[in-house]
Amino acid sequence: MPGLVVERLHGGAPHALAGQLSAAALITGTNGKTTTAAMLARILRADDRAVIHNHSGSNLMRGVTAALVEAASPLGALPNRATAVFEADEAALSEIAAAAPPSVAVFTNLMRDQLDRYGEIESIALRWADALGDVPRDATIALNVDDPLIASLESHWSGACLRFGIEDPDIPPAPDGEVMDAVWDPTTQDDFRYSRRYFAQLGRWHTDGGAQRPTPQVAADQIGSGKEGIAFTLRLPEGEQGVALPAEGLYSVYNALAAAAAATALGVGPDTICRALESHEAAFGRQEDLLVSGRRVRVLLGKNPSGLNQALRTLQTPGERHHLLVLLNDGIADGEDVSWIWDVDWESQAPHCRSLFVGGDRAADMALRLEYAGFPAPCAEATRDIDEILNRALSQVAEHERLVILPTYTAMLDVRRRLGQMGASRLWDVA
Amino acid sequence: MSVDWVLNVAVLYPELLNLYGDRGNARALERRCQTRGIDANVTPVGIGDRWSPEHADIVLVGGGQDREQRRVQSDLHRRGAALREFVEDDGVVLAVCGGFQLFGQHYRGWDGEIMEGIAVFDAVAAHPGPSIRRCVGNVVAIWEGETVVGFENHGGRTYLNEGQQAFASVVSGFGNNGGDGLEGAQRKNAFGTYLHGAVLPKNPRLADRLIALALERRYGADAPALEPLDDRAALRAHAEALHAAFTPAESAIGRRFA
């Protein structure tokens, strides 16, 4: 852990290194940080910049310090034109912004996540409003205006703001009864109302008090399925272009918009942005398809109700059924409170399940939830040993079929390690 | 199929007080009734809705943040007398976390502001201030000689006044206040608790107790006996939660990253 060592030895080191950066992008929000950061890094490399990037899961100050130290020469020099892409944990935003002043700060969304660790989401929104005070005045903030909690940050900011959102009028609405993570504006107490709601509190919103979703300058329209993933028209301040994004689900469009907005703020042109998005490769556990002993395996990280609902929707093609391995851990990084699984719409996934395997430290809690949702009885469950349950699930999958693994965060690390040992392809490019 | 027995289950403010999977409680009651040929009508009740407890058999209320509790407060007060009457008439209530606090005498929030409750339970709750740690973690408590399991996450500390019976006694976790070893409150057939998880699916005996009490109140001597169900999955989840309560997450993490 070089970050920890440097932090202990020399608290000013990250600041000194960060001073050499030609630009820095900071990405925060509940869902989509890792994928947005990966997309942005790819765009910046396509623009011939040296990219310094903290890896997924290292999104506290320590991970940022480690990324800077690793990128530096033995004499402490960063490469020329070095641009940093830092994903920042919701709670670490202020500290990271102060140590590595961003040129652009991106806010993706704010969802209910690990209440035992983060607390209530309105209080995060208020902390972020405060944290904007640590962002340099000449920086740009990029806001997802479809999330009213994110859009409201603009009122706490006097500098440049780039808004992004979805403009397509034909997006199917969120299912009835889906849990809303925010029901009203924390400042004015006005209820959010929707002419269209896509998922959680994201959509075309307004309030009776006269607030409404601002028009985005970076937008996706005409969203449809592409050859391998999702296709849409990307509108940028300097023109619009079609993008075929090799990823699925509306949340992938939001990730692409966030990355495009950040790249625009950093001066990258539309052609480079669109070309790089089309060559996107999923990070591990984020829609990545792996090949393991001739079988396809897809790992979809599921860590909170909104994120998992979105991931499940990518699996619900009519008539399609999957072998599913659901892994629920309750470590500190997963959230020790597993009650959130009751707020996930498993019911709509049940008809798409061919066979079910359940594992992790709280496998029995998960199995009970899935029994209530109408899933078939698990072929195997309540196995604490992830290696064993993974082997059993893989043995069920015929050569041309696919196993879908839905792990929480620490379970994903276990799965990554195990699949690596099994020689899964396309694993080593994600560190 | 004709349905001989019916229970009306009202869920108060499900859009606002739903913080910790509390929807699982209604699902548990619904399913445990329907498997036994008892029709459970689950009705959500929102702010301003026309509803009175007079036709209800079971009333559920879940947890919410302080600001959500404030939001429902005046509507709940409007229904306070009717709900107290419902409880005195042996109506069945399960009030969880924030809902439990609102069913007490009052709750003093971290900012010192007092929120009056509807006084079903003779209990007062107070938040000791934003700098004091919340009560967070797995809980094991003893209720009528058996374990009940769940997860708690509350800033407020509840103290029962003299004569107010607790729901359970704490074996592991904080319970009402982390000091007196008590968990929740019980007044006749009304149960208040800090346990979520959701609490009923993995504590099937507690779920069945609520159903049995409601059937007895509605049908008297004609109430059907509750036949046993296949609770293997529920009891495994119960056992796993017991294990989690006695295995701190820090050691689990240490093992994983070792």
Image (cartoon, rainbow, N blue to C red):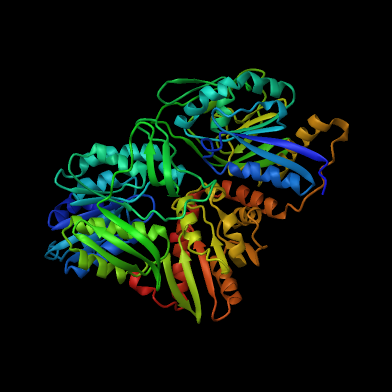
Residue at the image point whose x is 47% and y is 73% from the top: A419
The count of marks equals 0
User: Which residue is found at the position 41% from the left and 36% from the top?
Assistant: A184
User: Could you tell me residue A249's position as x and y percent?
Assistant: 43, 61
Picture coordinates of residue A155, whole percent (x, y): 25, 37
Please tell me which residue lies in front, A135 or A350: A350
At x 25% / y 56%, what residue is drawn?
A261
Q: Which quadrant of the structure image shows residue B197?
A: top right
Residue A352 figure quarter:
bottom right
Residue B16 placement, left or right of B87 = left
Viewer-nearest residue: B8 or A32: B8
Task: Name the residue: 65% across, 26% down.
Answer: B52
**A340 or B1: nearer the viewer:** B1
Residue A257 image offset from top left, x and y in percent: 30, 57
Above/below status of A223 relative to A429: above
Residue A34 visible: no
Residue A365 sits above or below residue A191 on the image: below
User: Would you say A71 lies left or right of B240 here?
Assistant: left
Residue A429 can be seen, yes or no: yes
Instruction: Find residue A430 and report its horizontal and vertical position in percent.
Output: 34, 69
Residues A192 and B110: in front is A192
Q: Quadrant of the C terminus of chain B?
A: bottom left
Farthest residue in the front direction? A169
